Image (cartoon, helix red, strand yellow):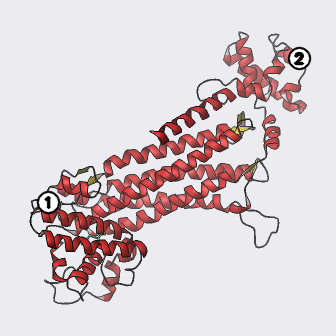
Amino acid sequence: MNSDNPKLWGGRFFKKSHPLFQRFNNSLSIDYRLAKYDILGSIAWSKSLLECRVLTVKEQKSIEDALYVLLKKVSSKPDIMLNSQCEDIHSWVEYKLINMIGTLGKKLHTGRSRNDQVATSLKLWCKDSIYNLILYLQKIQYTFILQAEISFKYIMPGYTHLQRAQPITFSFWCLAYFEMFKRDEERLTNLLSRINISPLGSGALSGTFCAIDRDKLATYMGFGDSTYNSLDAVSDRDYVIELLSIASISMMHLSRFAEDLIFFNSNEANFIELSDYVTSGSSLMPQKKNPDALELIRGKTGRVYGSLISMLVLLKGLPLSYNKDMQEDKEILFGSIEIWENSLNIAELVLQTIRINSQHCLKIAKHGYSNATELTDYLVKKGMSFRESHHVVGKIVLEAIDKKSFLEDLSIEVFQKYTPLFQDDVYEKLSLLSCINSKTSKGGVSFHQVLSSIKNIKNKLHENIFS
Ligand code: ARG
C-alpha cells in the first residue's frame, strides 16, 4: 500500500483484481460503521508497538496524533469514506494514515492482522450497542411502570386460548411486559462479561511475534481481559450469535406486545385507542386508522430471527480459523440491531400515547363467565373437592348461558338446586373486584400485590440510580 494505492496486498499478484470481483469483495459500504473502533484499536496497538520498541516515542506520537485527527473527522462525518476504493474499513484507516504521515504509517500493521483487527473492532461495536440497548430497555421498562401506576384499577378480561379466562387489570398486563424486558436487559448485561475480552494481539491466527503485553493492550481499549487462544480468538463470532439471539427473544417480546395491542385496539375489542402519532390511514377507506407501528414491529421480528439463523448457518461449516465468509457477519448484525433499537423506541412511544377505554374494558370483563373459577373456589372453601366443584360450576355456567344471564344474576334457588352449600354470601364473591382481590399470592393480580410489585420495582430503580 502507498498513498495512491489503497490496497493492503498485491506483491505476489501479476494482475489487478477484476472490477466485478472488487465490488463483490469490498465491504466498506457496510463496515464503515466500524471506523471509530478500528481507529481506537489502532491507537491502542501503536502504544503496544512502542512498548515493544517497534516504534519510537516520536513515531508513536505522530501515529496517535494523526489517528485522533482521523477520529475527529469520522465522528463529524461517519460516512466520509463511502466513495473510497478501499476494500474495507481497516484498509481505509491505514490508507488514510499513510496519506497523512507518509511511510511511518506503514509501520502500524507490524505484528497485526486484519483478522484480529476486525474481531476487535466488532467486539467494541457490540459493546457500545449493548450499552445503548440497555438504556432503551430500561426506558421501556420505566414506561411500563408508569402505565401500571396509572392503570392499576382498570379491570379488563384476561385470556387463555384467546378465550376470556379470568379478570385482570391493565396494570398487571403492564407488569408482565416489564418482567420480559427486564430479562432481556439481564441477558445483555450477562453477555457483556463475555464480550469484554480483547482479541487484539492474536495476529492472523497463531499470535504475534511482537513481545506485547496483551492484557495491558486490552485495557487501552476498555476491555477487562484478553483472549486465551489466538486460533479461537480470530474464529470466534459466538458473541454475534448471542447478541442476535437476545435480539430475537426481545423482538419476540415486542411482537407479542404488538399483537396484544393490535387486538386490544381492534374494533371488536375496543379496549384501547392508539394515538394518531403511531397509526396511519387508508388511501381508500376514510374511516380506517391502522396500527402500522405495531404491525411493523411484528413484521420486522421475522427478519431478526432470520439473521440469527443466517449467522448460525454462516459459521456451522467453517474450518478454523478466519474465512472470508465471516465478512458477512456485519451486514447481518448491523441491520438487526438497528431494527431492535427502532422497535424498542417505537413500542415505547406507542405505550406512552395509548388511551385506555377503562369503562368498556370493565364491561367486557363481566362477560364470558370469567368469574366461574371464583364459584369453584367458593365451594372448595365450603368443603367440596375441587374436581366435584369444577363439575357443578360447569353445569351452572351451562344454565346461565341458556338463560343468557351473568352468574351473579342467577337466583339463590338456582344455585342451591346444584348444592345446598351455596348461601347468600356467594354474590359478593362473584364481583369482579372480589375475583381480582382474591389473587393475593406473590405475583397475583390483587390490587395489593400489584401495588407492592410497583413499589418494589421503583425502590430497586431508585437504588440502581443512586448506587
Ligand atoms: N473485511 C474483513 C471482514 O470483515 C476483514 C478481515 C479480512 N481478513 C482477511 N484475511 N482477508 O471480515
Which residue is rendered at x = 51% and y = 62% of the image?
Answer: 339
Q: Residues within 10 Å of mark 2 (few under 14, many from 20)?
A: some
Report which residue position mark 1 lands on: 207
**Is 138 rendered above or below residue 443?**
below
Which residue is rendered at x = 23% and y = 63% of the image?
Answer: 44
Task: Please tell me the numbered disc located at residue 412.
Answer: 2
Q: Residues within 10 Å of mark 1 (few under 14, many from 20)?
A: many
**Is 354 rendered above or below residue 71?**
above
Q: Counting residues from the N terminus, which is met first, the one under dot 2 or under dot 1? A: 1
Which residue is rendered at x = 78% and y = 49% of the image?
Answer: 270
Give the percent coordinates (x, y) of residue 79: 42, 77
From the viewer's side, name the closer residue of 167 and 405: 167
Q: Are marks 2 and 1 in contact (CB under 8 Å)?
A: no
Q: How many marks?
A: 2
The answer to which image quadrant residue 376 occupies is top right
Give the percent coordinates (x, y) of residue 331: 40, 68
Q: For the C terminus, which image quadrant?
A: top left
Residue 22 placement, left or right of 98: right
Looking at the rendered structure, the kind of residue marked 1 is Gly
Task: Please tell me the numbered disc located at residue 199.
Answer: none
Looking at the rendered structure, the kind of residue marked 2 is Ile
Residue 211 placement, left or right of 141: left
The answer to whether one can see residue 279 in this image is yes
Which residue is rendered at x = 82% and y = 10% of the image?
Answer: 420
Give the percent coordinates (x, y) of residue 220: 25, 57
**Of helix, strand and loop, which one carries label 2?**
helix
**Of helix, strand and loop, which one carries label 1?**
loop
Structural distance between the alpha carbons of marks 2 and 1: 84 Å
